[in-house]
Amino acid sequence: MTDTTNTQAETAEQQNGTGEIDSAAAIAANKTPATSGEVKIHCVDVDVFYGETQAIKKVSIDIEDKAVTAFIGPSGCGKSTFLRCLNRMNDTIDICRVTGQIVLDGGDIYDADVDPVQLRARVGMVFQKPNPFPKSIYENVAYGPKIHGLAGSKAELDSIVEQSLKRAALWDEVKDRLDSPGTGLSGGQQQRLCIARAVATAPEVLLMDEPCSALDPIATAQVEELIDELRQSYSVVIVTHSMQQAARVSQKTAFFHLGLMLEYDDTGKIFTAPSHEKTQQYITGRFG
Amino acid sequence: MSTTVDFTELSAKHTGEANKSRLKARYWAEIRLKAYGIAAIGVAAFALVLLLSTIITKTASVVYEKYITLEATIEVSDRDRERLADENPRMRANLRRVVQASIANAIPGEIGRRESRQANSILSGDAGLFLGDQVKADSSLIGQTIEFDALLDDNMQLYLKGIVGRPEEIKSSGPLSVTAPDEDGVVTATFDPSDIGAIFQAIREQRADDAARARSEQRRQQNAVDVTEALLLEAEGEEERAAVQTRLDNFVAARDRAEAQADELMRLATVIGEDVRYTLTESDPSLLMRAGPGWLKLTEVERGEATGTIYLPLSDGEPAAAEFAEGEWQAYIMERPEATRLQSDRQVVWMENFEDRGLIKEVLNTRILTQSDSASAELAGIWGAVVGSFWTMMVTFLLAFPLGVMASIYLEEFAPKNRVTDLIEVNINNLAAVPSIVFGLLGLAIFVSGVPVNIFGNEFTIGGFLPRSSPLAGGAVLALMTLPTIIIAGRASIRAVPPSIRDAALGLGASKLQTATHHVLPLAMPGILTGSIIGMAQALGETAPLLLVGMNSFIQEPPADPLSPGNVLPTLIYQWNSNSERLFDDKTAAAISILLIFLVLMNALAVLLRKRFERRW
């Protein structure tokens, strides 16, 4: 009896998996990779160690400007770790050590004379779980511009906040209650608030670490739409577990496995004709 | 190792007989455990109720204080007149003579020299000063005859509250006839022989008690005799034998004395109230008679007759023989012997008389809150200690809070995690468990006395920069004690701020310091404050370290600033408790109640803060 159930479940899974991949491939194929081809971040032989453990092994990747780059791969493959290298968030972890070169607009971000605080103003970040400050919506968005001295006057700050919220497609929903706490918003709104907050510091690169994993499908769709819009002015790097999402929003996709970057190519190509066997297995749902 | 287990058999065990008894045992264990828990809670609750009820009943007895309404003609000496006219409120006139004259007037009949001293001690020692203050406030009173309220001495207040007992009436039925008093005021009273039998009973019991005490003394001496006799047998040499013999003789004599005393007391206990005339001593219960407006105290009693001294005249006119019908006179017994109380029989009679005349007044006791310490129990208050506690707490807070917050934010947010910080952490946690008196010793050595150091012949002193007994020194010591509590609470609440908030701030390009001050600290602040308030409450109740820096001095004025000498509530309680005056006992309870109120308020504030700012992420 148990045997029968297992078989059924497997079959269902396979069918389901195949169906998903088909749709993801279809989405990717439909999309014209409208990339400029300009390299924003140039990474060469990046190694990351947590104490003795090597989490990232010799990753070299060129991240393009005004494009969405998706990092996919099974859990624990190092995609989030690598993302956090791009704005030196790993510096906050004592035992973490990064070697190799990460060049942003011609300057190595791990140079001794680079201030990580300044770097993070240029490379913004949105986290997996919405994490607005327990302050008002206005304060949340205005915080970045304030500490970086972006606004010369109150009026200017107001317009930065307004524009950021508009870009995050949140303005209409919150314009009447800018003084209410950001933590009182719904999950999707909170995540968009976090995006608005990141956008408000006027970064050049926006890093997103599974920004939709804590959201329901409707909120996810809103955020994805937003990402697509943000691409017009930023270089966006997104870590995602959902291959459909990668296919929907990104132009380039990198596949990570066990700390190695196995494949990096146009999203359409990754999902239709992956060159690496592991990529093939992953996107068809054989593992991960 | 490889015995095969049949799982079907195992499953059957779930419904077996053995399982049932196991289940029963389990239920029993649960019931037992619950019973233990309830019993423990019951014991704790009982102890708490006992403690609170003791404190509250004692406190309740000092909620009111007693005054006597007197009449006085304000006559002042030239010196006092000058003082009364002085603008300086610290110049006070003590109208002692006026007050003493009015208390003498208030007592019916003539009073002699010895009695007048007793009369004066009815009033608080500062009654003259208070009248002086009253006159100073309204100088038109000089030369007039006014009614004023004078504060009673602590012993009189205690008497009125019944602490030493009040005279209890003894049944009497017949008439009473009293002879005219001789020049010493001694009279002979005759009454129905069946009357006041209870008096004899009381004295008999008293004698029997004394006899029992003498018997036990006799037994004690007998033991000594037995032991010494044994020693005498073992003694070697003429000299030693003689020494032991002397000791033995002493013990034998003492035993015989005790025996004789016990026999005599027992005899008395049986014959009192028979036809023997018995002379009452100071150690006997006092026998008093009220007849008409007057009182007399009995000195010798027998059936149907007694000799007594007139304490208050029995009639308004010239002293003469008098007859009182049944109901016009009462006999009283004051169980507690005069020798064992601070209120003489005369004072007892006077107080009863004052109360009958409605001169005694009960007034809400604000003195205990508004006045500072005093040697007289009826004058002492806690205000000086409250001010001292306030200064001390201010100093403690101002020193410990910023240091504690800075230390905890550094240790949590900035310090590298290594052996040194581990060591510091362990030490801070251990500091919280150090007995507070150790901090007192440290504070005494470093803050107050200073540590003499001699390096290569150069002598100098380290520390010793704070004045002894000052709230500054006490506050500094308490700050040392509170610091670990604040650091531990601070670190815990900083750690409770979710890392996602730090990530958010760092991700926006905020520096570590900005992250800490803009986000982490404000979010952790309610927790830090809660911990600090609890630490401060602990410091407010702390006594031992403050005793060491001299904050238990007798100080009659509230400290004007943190540098002047002062004491704090707990040390005041400690001092009052070691005072012998009985009223200080009740005032101690009152001071404890007030301290408890402060502590409850502080803890309530902490709970309120925690509830108000409780955040969920």
Image (cartoon, coloured by chain):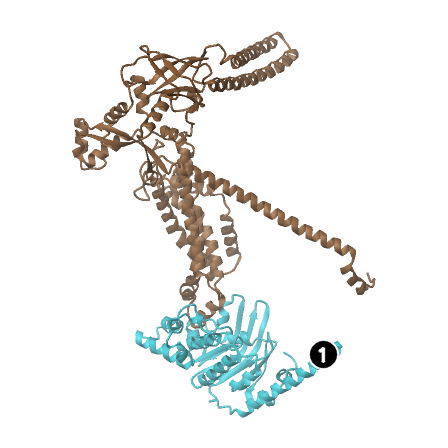
Q: Which residue is mark 1?
A: A6
On what subunit does the disc labeled 1 rest? A
Where residue A193 sits: x, y (%)? 43, 75
Out of B27 and A266, give the one closest to the viewer. Answer: B27
Quadrant where the C terminus of chain A sits is bottom right
A186 over B398 or under it: above or below: below
- Image position of B10 (left or right of B397): right
Which amino acid, by three-letter code, is at mark 1? Asn
Please state the horizontal and vertical placement of residue B470, each as a whole percent of the image: 35, 41
Q: Residues within 10 Å of mark 1 (few under 14, many from 20)?
A: few
Chain coloured cyan: A
Give the brown chain's letter.
Answer: B
Q: Nearer the viewer, residue B75 or B92?
A: B75
Residue nearest the observer in this picture, A97 or B331:
B331
Q: Residue at x 48, y 73 (%)?
A: A130
Quarter of image, res A144: bottom left
Q: Is residue A20 above or below residue B454?
A: below
Give me the residue at 38% from left, 47% from top.
B393
Q: Secondary structure at mark 1?
A: helix
Q: How many marks?
A: 1
Q: Residue furthest right?
A: B3
Q: Say which residue appears at 57% left-offset and 83% top-offset.
A: A243
Residue A131 in the image: state x and y as whole percent: 47, 71
